Each structure stands twice: as structure tokens, then as C-alpha cells.
Image (cartoon, rainbow, N blue to C red):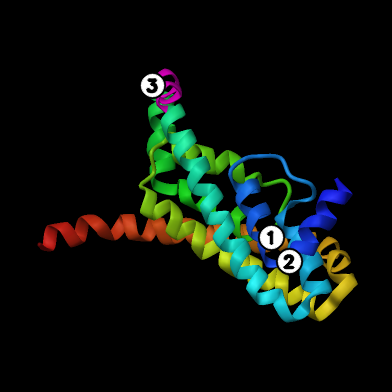
């Protein structure tokens, strides 16, 4: 594992692009995109922002593959588990609020919020592609740019800083989740009024 990680570090920006695509496509990887990006930002601070951009692009490419697999393979699952009343309610809930559960773990590196589970639900529930990828891009670019900046500025202390701020990240995730949930509810509440005025 360490040897492969060292090879990817030696590849620089190309290595982070490949690893991000592999990870987001659902294939196990040695250490993850976040860890490799921090290593590259520390080892090559001059390439940190390029690596962040390529990590985000690689993540979008891999997620496109993962989305298509779950979308096509999820049709039988959808028919089997969402035909009942509870399944139908979950489908309606995910159609309205599900992308919030995709956005938060895609934005913040929090281990207890598994991105793949929510991304798979988006594919299975046939969330429109453009919505899924807009949400993913809005999360991945800031995440990787922030990690690259952290690696540039703190160097070897980056991982310790992240570990020391886990609770802050959880609080931020909760705040973002509540804010987005409130926004969706507010938009939903205004929608009938807009229709009636037309």
C-alpha cells in the first residue's frame, strides 16, 4: 500500500487525478484522495492548487461511472423496495432532500458520513444527472482547494489539525445541513403561492 502511495505521489498531479477517479468510482484505494492531496500539497506546494483542481475533476469522472452503475443496477432494487408506502415515502423524501445528504459528506471529510451510500441512493433514485453533478461539483472543488491550502500552509501538521477539529467539522456539517433543509422547506412553502399568482 505504501509503495503504491509513494508511486502516486511521484506522479504528482496525474497521480491525484487517477486516484480520485478510482476512489469515486467505488474501487478501494490506499489511503484516499484527501490523504494523497495533503501529501502532495506538502511535498509540492507549488502544484497544490493544480492537484486540488485535478482531484475534483477526477472525483467527478469517477462519480459519473459510479452514478451510472447504481442507476442502471438500481432499477430492480427500486422496484422491489419502493413499491410499498414506506418505500414510496422514502423515495419522495430523497427526491426533495436527498441531495443535501450528498452535498455534506462530499464537502466535509467526516468519516461517519459515508458519501458512497448517499451517492448510490442518488443513482438508484434516478436523481437528474445535472442536479447530482452540480451538487457534487459545488462540494468537491471547495473541499479539495481547502485541503490543498491547508497542506501548503501547515505542512506536516495538516493531519493533526484535521484530527483536532473533528468536532468543529461535525458542527459545521450540522449547521450546513439545517440551513439547506430550511432553504428547501422555504422554497417548497413559496412554490404554491408562485403557481397561484401565474
Asked if disc 1 and disc 2 are in contact, CB closer than 8 Å, the reply is yes
Q: Which badge, 1 or 3, comes first in the chain's sequence? A: 1
Q: Which residue is mark 1?
A: 16
Q: Residues within 10 Å of mark 2 (few under 14, many from 20)?
A: many
Query: Which of labels 2 and 3 is toward the front?
Result: 2
Q: Secondary structure at mark 2?
A: loop
Residue 178 location, quadrant: bottom right
Q: Is residue 15 visible?
A: yes
Image position, residue 46 (x, y; %): 74, 81
Residue 33 location, quadrant: bottom right
The single residue placed furthest to the left in the displayed view is 198
- Residue displayed at 84% across by 57% down: 6
Query: Which of labels 1 and 2 is toward the front?
Result: 2
Asked whether, in this view, residue 52 is left or right of residue 194, the answer is: right
Quarter of the picture containing the C terminus is: bottom left
Asked whether, in this view, residue 177 is left or right of residue 181, the answer is: right
- Residue displayed at 48% across by 47% down: 64
Q: CA distance from mark 1 to mark 2?
A: 7 Å
Does residue 108 lie above or below 83 as drawn? below
Asked whether, in this view, residue 145 is left or right of residue 78, the answer is: right
Q: Which residue is mark 2?
A: 12
Magenta extent: 75-82
- Residue displayed at 39% across by 54% down: 131
- Main secondary structure found in the magenta portion: helix
Does residue 2 lie above or below 126 as drawn? below
Q: Nearer the viewer, residue 6 or 57?
A: 6
Image position, residue 54 (x, y; %): 60, 65
Q: Which residue is mark 3?
A: 79
Image position, residue 18 (x, y; %): 65, 54
Q: CA distance from mark 2 to mark 3?
A: 44 Å
Amino acid at each position: 500500500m505504501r509503495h503504491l502511495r509513494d508511486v502516486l505521489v511521484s506522479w504528482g498531479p496525474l497521480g491525484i487525478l487517477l486516484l480520485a477517479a478510482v476512489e469515486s468510482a467505488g474501487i478501494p484505494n490506499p489511503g484516499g484522495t484527501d490523504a494523497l492531496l495533503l501529501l502532495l500539497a506538502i511535498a509540492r506546494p507549488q502544484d497544490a492548487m493544480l492537484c486540488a483542481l485535478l482531484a475534483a475533476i477526477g472525483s467527478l469522472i469517477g462519480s459519473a461511472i459510479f452514478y451510472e452503475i447504481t442507476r442502471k443496477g438500481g432499477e430492480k432494487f427500486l422496484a422491489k423496495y419502493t413499491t410499498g408506502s414506506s418505500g414510496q415515502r422514502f423515495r419522495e423524501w430523497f427526491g426533495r432532500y436527498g441531495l443535501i445528504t450528498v452535498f455534506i459528506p462530499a464537502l466535509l471529510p467526516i468519516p461517519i458520513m459515508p458519501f458512497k451510500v448517499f451517492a448510490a441512493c442518488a443513482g438508484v433514485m434516478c436523481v437528474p444527472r445535472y442536479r447530482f453533478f452540480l451538487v457534487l461539483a459545488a462540494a468537491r472543488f471547495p473541499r479539495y482547494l481547502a485541503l490543498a491550502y491547508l497542506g501548503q500552509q501547515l505542512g506536516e501538521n495538516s493531519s493533526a489539525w484535521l484530527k483536532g477539529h473533528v468536532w468543529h467539522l461535525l458542527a459545521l456539517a450540522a449547521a450546513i445541513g439545517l440551513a439547506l433543509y430550511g432553504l428547501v422547506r422555504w422554497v417548497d412553502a413559496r412554490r404554491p403561492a408562485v403557481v397561484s399568482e401565474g
